[in-house]
Image (cartoon, helix red, strand yellow):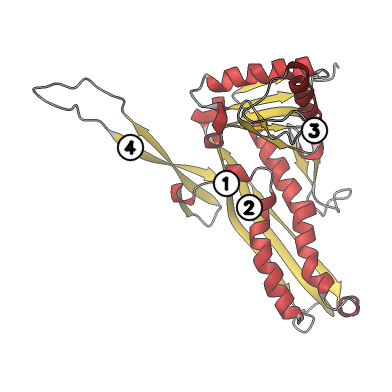
Amino acid sequence: MALGDYVTKYTDRLDKIIERETLTSDLNMNGDLLGEFSDTGEIKVATIAMDGLANYDRATGFVDGEVTTDWETYKLRYDRGRSFSIDAMDDEERAGIVSANVMAEFERTKVIPEVDAIRFATLAGNAGNTEAADITTSDAAYKAVATAEEAVEDTGVDLSTCLLYCTSTIKRLLRENVKQNYRLSQGENPNGKFTMWDEMKIVTVPSSRFQSKITLLDGTTSGQEAGGFKAAEDALALNFMIVHPSAAAAIQRHKKLRYFAPDTNQKRDAHLWQYRLFHDLLVYEQQKGKIFAHTAAANAA
């Protein structure tokens, strides 16, 4: 297969990787509620408000109600990118496969973890309910999640429509609680695949992505050349989060992947790949109660 065919094949595939493989893909927003983006990265998002029921009068009939659609302006915060060059001879020796696959590997191992980390930190920073404690036993895990469920349910949402994001440790402790107390979701086998808790979908998150705050490395400052992200100095490790998808919206303004063959690369005899992603996670002020974040206890000073 010619390199150009590889490029087309993998570029098309890359377009779907973030949506398919991010752990926060359930938060991707319905595009129908989005307005136009401005050149400055601002976007208008629709919020709908309406009157409640009124008394029906047999003589005069219905009481008129009002529905309003407000377009709130948000500014996207994260504009990230990177370029890679693969020497033409190196690529030729590998029959073109390395160059065609390199960006897919970059997106899976670098882009997706960062996108998830940004979204989880944003959710944690905007959670309407938070709690901090170290969880080391199955009973403590059960009680902590039960408390979170109560807070989220009090906003009027059904747990079956919520997501339970948690570390592998919390998942193990919850599973141990199931085995000890025979507490099963519908059709759940304590010795089988553990995917639900109180009808909530369980999403296991690597601890590196699951921090209350993160720092993005700019790629140019001394010590930050590698780019990517890390936990902020004052970050707390997240134990778990319960989130209703209506509380937040993951928005991608611009994802660009460009390829320049060695013959068109003006800098060197190399395959040049350029990747850019402009995105954010928007949390609605009136929906913050639908987010519960549980972190590890803060270290004593």
* Res. 68 mark: 4
Q: Residue 30 location in percent, x, y?
A: 49, 48
Quadrant of residue 72 within the rendered picture: top left
Please, what secondary structure does the residue beneath circle 2 have? helix
Toward the bottom, the furthest residue is: 263
* Res. 28 mark: 1
300 horizontally vs 210: left or right = right
Choose the circle earlier in sequence order: 2 or 3: 2
Q: Residue 206 location in percent, x, y?
A: 79, 39
Q: Residue 53 location in percent, x, y?
A: 28, 24
- Is residue 220 among what the camera can see? yes
Of residues 73 and 163, which is closer to you in this image?
A: 163
Real-space Cα separation, disc 1 to disc 3, in angstroms? 24 Å
Residue plotted at (65% across, 18% down): 146
Q: Which amino acid does label 2 sit on?
A: Glu
Please, what secondary structure does the residue beneath circle 1 have? loop
Total number of numbered discs in the rendering: 4
Q: Which amino acid does label 3 sit on?
A: Ser
Q: Which amino acid does label 4 sit on?
A: Thr
Real-space Cα separation, disc 2 to disc 1, in angstroms? 8 Å
Please, what secondary structure does the residue beneath circle 4 have? strand
Residue for badge 3: 168
Residue plotted at (84% across, 80% down): 269
